[in-house]
Image (cartoon, helix red, strand yellow):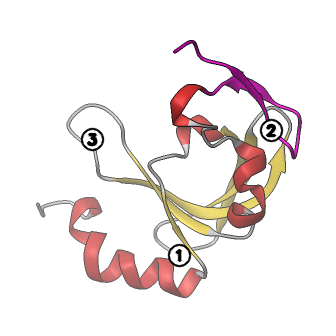
């Protein structure tokens, strides 16, 4: 069966759909991601799978990108803002609050980031 072009009813984005249907892109998720807190992870090298960033999604941007606020690890203060393509966010873990993000880090992920631990 030849893939057919499917048009998103929200933004008009077009892509081949075929039998798998319409895959996610920013307009499908912007309402559910904006305001969420997250951990991102290293994708390559010895640190692959370890926590890289912590932050909050501030807003959806054009062309399937999001503006995110990053926070320091030591004091938890705002650090810098970056624009990230949605394609790089698909393996991030999202949380409804900063408290839940910190709880998960402290109880499940901390050993991945602290020197001298597994």
Residue receiving disc 1: 75
How many C-alpha atoms fall within 10 Å of the one at disc 2: few (<14), some, or many (≥20)?
A: some
Q: CA distance from mark 2 to mark 1?
A: 42 Å
Give the vertical position of 67 relative to 110 (above or below). Answer: above
Q: Earlier in the sequence, mark 2 or mark 3?
A: 2
Q: Which segment is the magenta one?
A: 1-17
Q: Viewer-nearest of labels 2 and 3?
A: 2
- Residue farthest to the front, as pictured: 1
Q: Residue at x 57, y 12 (%)?
A: 2
Q: Position of residue 9 (x, y in %)?
A: 86, 43
Label 1: which secondary element: loop
How many C-alpha atoms fall within 10 Å of the one at disc 1: few (<14), some, or many (≥20)?
A: few
Indicate yes or no whether the magenta region holds residue 92.
no
Q: Residue at x 46, y 80 (%)?
A: 102
Q: Earlier in the sequence, mark 1 or mark 3?
A: 3
Q: Report the side of 97 relative to 35 (left or right).
A: left
Q: Earlier in the sequence, mark 2 or mark 1?
A: 2
- Occupied quadrant, residue 112: bottom left
Q: Residue at x 64, y 37 (%)?
A: 22
Q: Position of residue 93 (x, y in %)?
A: 46, 62
Q: Position of residue 4 (x, y in %)?
A: 67, 19
Q: CA distance from mark 2 to mark 3?
A: 34 Å
Residue receiving disc 3: 48
Residue receiving disc 2: 8
């Amino acid at each position: 069966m030849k893939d057919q072009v499917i048009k998103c009813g929200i933004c008009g984005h077009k892509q081949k759909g075929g039998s798998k249907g319409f895959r996610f892109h920013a307009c499908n998720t912007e309402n559910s991601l904006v305001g969420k807190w997250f951990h991102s992870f290293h994708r390559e090298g010895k640190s692959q799978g370890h926590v890289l960033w912590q932050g909050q999604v501030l807003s959806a941007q054009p062309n399937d990108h999001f503006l995110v606020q990053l926070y320091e690890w030591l004091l938890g203060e705002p650090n810098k803002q970056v624009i990230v393509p949605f394609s790089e966010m698909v393996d991030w873990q999202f949380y409804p609050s900063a408290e839940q993000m910190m709880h998960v880090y402290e109880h499940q992920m901390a050993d991945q980031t602290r020197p001298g631990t597994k």
